[in-house]
Image (cartoon, grey):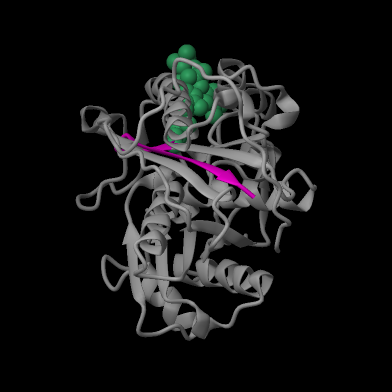
Amino acid sequence: MRFSRRSRRSTGACRYCRPRSGADRKGHSTQMPSTRAHIVSVGTAVPDRVLTNEDLEKILDTSDEWITTRTGIKRRHVLDKGDPTTASELGARAASRALAGAGLAPGDIDGIICATFTPDYFFPSTACLIGRHLGIHDVCAFDISAACAGFVYGLSLANALVLSGQCAKVLVVGAEIISKTLDWNDRSTAILFGDGAGAVVVAAHEQPDTGILGTYLSSDGRLSDILTMPAWGERRCMTMKGSEVFKHAVRLMGDAVFKALDAAGLDHGAIDLLIPHQANARIISSLAEHFAVPREKVVTNLQEYGNTSSASIPLALQDAFNDGRITGGTLVALTSLGGGLACASAIIRF
Ligand SMILES: CC(C)(COP(=O)(O)OP(=O)(O)OC[C@H]1O[C@@H](n2cnc3c(N)ncnc32)[C@H](O)[C@@H]1OP(=O)(O)O)[C@@H](O)C(=O)NCCC(=O)NCCS
């Protein structure tokens, strides 16, 4: 997918957009040079099987009414119990669609970044395996562990690789098979998540007014115990202090948007579309209120997919492209939060 260039600049300033250059904050904001990294295509893949809230009522002490009112989720895609599909296979499917959308061959790609907390192996990386599935060799490839913030972390790193000249075309993939990791007796987590993958191609273009205009990465290890997935031990299932995560999610994802806008030199009034990590509809509503953004400018698709962690933002991006909410010139804010706590945001002009 390609977009015509349309320059739109924000006017006015807010207290969050003090004009300054370079990175001077605790997180890593960056101000971009004249060549930009652009998202030129997106592709997604989800398992065929759909698990509804009504299905969950049959196996857990829960109800469609509780899940809908507390989370906004109605259904999610999950692998069948015996389905051996791996995160790298799901990611490769999404990446292959992104390549097709960009009109590129595997040999055109010179970098693969995969965000996942459900990798095939500790090593080799899921990114290397995606390369193997697609026939992309002799390229920079690595995984990112930033849980639900992983995709936007990856996007920011792809941006840096492109701007530094180390790569020209990078696949950024978020791929998760979360259903394999859940404790299906734990109603507080089993209802929230789904499987899926999403990928984008990030490429260099001499179009300074469009592309990735600003990014922000941050973390707070003091909150590392409120959302965990142990690598070792008897009980290797996700644990979560849901209300704690909820509280910090609204604050941190909101602040992260302001920081990325700051890096881009833009005011929050310039945002055409807000795409938050799809964790909970109430978190998304609070964010929309925070930015005084009307609901029609906020992408919400978690009712269909649940929380797919690193795949959630590209799945939402795909929906926004499909329904025509992203066209040439649209200014999009991405914001995400995950275990760590890790937080990442990006401002992109398409
Ligand atoms: C998980 C979450 C939906 C729970 O909603 P909540 O309003 O905070 O609910 P609580 O955890 O306070 O639980 C309230 C009650 O509902 C019960 N409950 C929990 N899960 C339930 C379910 N699936 N069905 C029915 N009842 C449930 C709890 O046991 C508790 O009962 P009690 O009052 O008798 O002890 C919410 O905290 C959340 O979405 N947090 C963010 C999670 C998240 O986004 N994680 C990923 C971040 S990347």
Choose top left, top right, bottom left or bottom right for residue 197.
bottom right
Relative placement, left or right, of 223 versus 3 is left
Residue 246, percent from left and from top: 45, 23
Q: Main secondary structure of the magenta part?
A: strand
Question: Magenta residues?
Answer: 337-350
108 relative position to 337: left or right: right
Work out whether residue 287 or residue 195 is closer to the camera in this orientation and state it: 287
* Quadrant of the frame with the N terminus: bottom right
| Residue 308 in the figure: left or right of residue 297 | left
x%, y% of residue 206?
A: 54, 62
Compare residues 127 and 157 and report the one nearer the observer: 157
User: In the visual, does 98 lie left or right of 14?
Assistant: right
Q: How many marks?
A: 0
Q: Is residue 345 above or below residue 6?
A: above
Asked if residue 346 lies in the magenta stretch, the reply is yes
Residue under the image location 46 percent in, 65 percent down: 87
Q: Nearer the viewer, residue 60 or 73?
A: 73
Residue 38 spot, x, y in % from top left: 55, 57
| Location of residue 63 with respect to 107 vertically, above or below | above
- The x, y position of residue 310, in whole percent, is 47, 50
Residue in the picture at 20% in, 52% down: 232
Q: Is residue 228 above or below residue 350?
A: above
User: Can residue 299 be seen?
Assistant: yes
Q: Is residue 67 visible?
A: no
Using the rendered view, name the quadrant where residue 302 is placed. top right
Membership of 196 in magenta stretch: no
Residue lying at 40% horizontally and 71% vertically, measured from the top left? 111
Q: 105 or 349: nearer the eye?
A: 349
**Direction right: furthest residue:** 323
